[in-house]
Image: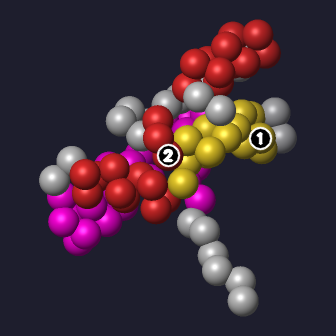
Amino acid sequence: MTRTDIETWARAAEVELLFADGFDDALIGIGQRFNDYFLVYDYAKVIAALRRDGMDAEDAEEYFSFNVVGAWVGDATPCFVWGIDVQ
């Protein structure tokens, strides 16, 4: 699912979605909480994007914590998913 696909769906569904700028490669889908819709991003891919932009691991984690996941912008605020390994 691309950003264009999501934007097309949101227009048709008359749903407001908020994108986290610079992380389109980390988009994994659309989430729903009651009547609220929000974008879902892969945490590891967001960190990888920050690292590609020149941050080291510690700086990427700190930036993510304060400026990405720490930014509440209303009910359409994106969420970030951490994968787990089940063995």
Residue under the point 25% across and 51% down: 52
Query: Up-down: is 6 above or below 61?
Result: above
Query: What label sits on residue 26 in the rendered view?
Result: 2
Q: How is the image coloured?
A: secondary structure
The residue tagged with tag 1: helix, strand or loop? strand
Question: Within the magenta stretch, is there residue 67?
Answer: yes
Left or right: 34 with respect to 45?
A: right
Left or right: 45 with respect to 18?
A: left
Query: What label sits on residue 83 in the rendered view?
Result: none
Amino acid type, callout 2: Ala
Query: Disc 1 versus disc 2: distance between alpha carbons?
Result: 18 Å
The residue tagged with tag 2: helix, strand or loop? helix
What stretch of residues is rendered in magenta?
55-81
- Residue 81 visible in the displayed image: yes
Q: Position of residue 21 (x, y in %)?
A: 38, 33
Q: Position of residue 25 (x, y in %)?
A: 47, 41
Left or right: 77 with respect to 33?
A: left
Q: Residues within 10 Å of mark 2 (few under 14, many from 20)?
A: some
Query: Up-down: is 61 above or below 12?
Result: below
Question: Within the magenta stretch, is there residue 22?
Answer: no
Q: Position of residue 82 (x, y in %)?
A: 57, 66
Residue under the point 72% across and 18% down: 9
| Res 12 → quadrant | top right
Quadrant of the snapshot with the C terminus = bottom right
Residue under the point 70% across and 38% down: 30
Residue at numbered disc 1? 32
Q: Residues within 10 Å of mark 1 (few under 14, many from 20)?
A: few
Amino acid type, callout 1: Gln
Residue under the point 16% across and 53% down: 54
